[in-house]
Image (cartoon, helix red, strand yellow):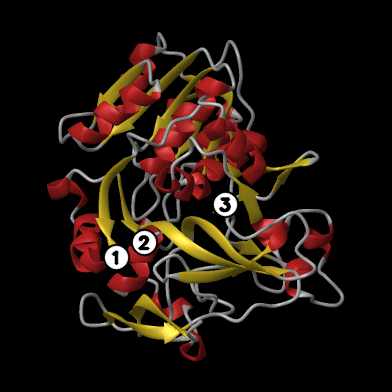
Amino acid sequence: MSDMMKAVVWDGGRWPEGVALQEFPKPKLRPGWVLIRNRAAGICGSDLHYLGGQTRHLVPDENLPAVLGHESAGVVVEASDEAAGLSPGDRVAVEPLHGCLELGRVPPCPPCLTGQYHVCQHGLTHVGIPLVEMLPGGYGEYSIVHASRLFKLPDHVTFEAAALIDVLAVGVHALAVGPSGPGDTVAVLGSGVIGIDLIQCLKAWGVTTVYATAKYEFQAAAAAQAGADEVIRLDKDTDSVEAIRELTGGCGVDAVYEAVGGRTDVIDEGIRMCRNGGKVIMTGIFEGQRPVDLLQMLFKEVHLLSSNSYSTTGMRRDYRIAVDLLATGRVSHEFAVTHRFPLSDWREAIDTAFDKKGSQCLRAVMMHEA
């Protein structure tokens, strides 16, 4: 077997000049790890931030060139002797997060010891995100993944649907951080893929009424398909806070789940559309400092909670819960994957993801040959 693989490689430069399809060293197996042949890789918004230069400063030069793609699923090619329960040919979803225990750090940090590896004090390593270490992601033919980070897939779950389990696990964790259930009325701000999966999670948890906001018409349609009871289409004349308050008879919602981030003021909007004593759960990645009316937050006693990625809820991993939701049909990703491309069409795939409005793209996925 060749020591090289075909991969879409990022050299640290801006899109499109900094990216090329080329030969790249195949990752070498480690004790306790598994070699995966990738079959599908989602093009996440965070990938676009690296390629577009917004977050280039976060990536150490020594971790470049890199193969991105932390949303992935594939087939086991080879498993080390320590990787019990996994065999060549197994269809698997890849959880990209690796903390102290998986990396063999001694001593492991306290968060990792308690299952909260998503906030690892020594730096969380991702497959496909070269912040701490360069582990090639789904934009390449092969990846290595710790055995504890692989989840077997039933045959009826497609690879492209499984690649988005990373997104679904974010929604699962958000409901662990800020629980909602039967009888609750909630708002989901943003109807990209994270917002779509949050809506589906809320409905699976039995939440009575879910309102959603959507920037584009195609996102509004997806939010409705995901189960939103009412979708507020944002335009220049829309006041989302006023719209939510009208829908709730002036009271406000019990909880707001934010899935926008960026340079927006949605956290402050969430506080204003919450009922007194309600809560706002933040999942988006914001740029710089954003304004928040702390006095209103205090007087209303609105609880602001941050939900970062995913890890462990109680005795179960968030990723395990997400896999089960998808496998049992309580959540669907078939409509969330709007564009599929073979690896040979990688330029068109990434361009499509960048041009979200023009292409009406929720999630573009690059597919590898079997």
Which residue is at the front of the view, 242 or 321? 321
Name the residue: 40% across, 34% down: 196
Q: Quadrant of the C terminus?
A: bottom left
The residue where tag 1 is placed is: 343
Badge number at residue 92 = 3
Q: Is residue 275 visible?
A: no
Q: Label 2, label 1: how many angstroms apart (C-alpha)?
A: 6 Å
Which residue is at the front of the view, 21 or 84? 84
Q: Label 2 is placed on what type of residue?
A: His
Which residue is at the front of the view, 202 or 156? 156
For numbered disc 3, what is the local secondary structure?
A: strand
Residue 45 in the image: above or below residue 328 = below
Q: Label 3 is placed on what type of residue?
A: Val
Badge number at residue 333 = none
| Contact, mark 2 vs mark 1 (Cβ under 8 Å) | yes
Position of residue 94 in the picture relative to residue 229 (left or right): right
Name the residue: 66% across, 42% down: 320
Q: Label 3, label 2: how many angstroms apart (C-alpha)?
A: 14 Å
Name the residue: 42% across, 12% down: 248
The residue where tag 2 is placed is: 368
Nearer-N-terminus badge (2/1): 1
For numbered disc 1, what is the local secondary structure?
A: helix
Asked which quadrant contains residue 343, the reply is bottom left
Q: Residue 95: x, y in percent?
A: 59, 55
Residue 187 in the image: above or below residue 5 = above
Q: Label 1 is placed on what type of residue?
A: Leu
Residue 221 in the image: above or below residue 29 = above
Nearer-N-terminus badge (3/1): 3
Name the residue: 34% across, 55% down: 263
Q: Residue 77: x, y in percent?
A: 57, 66
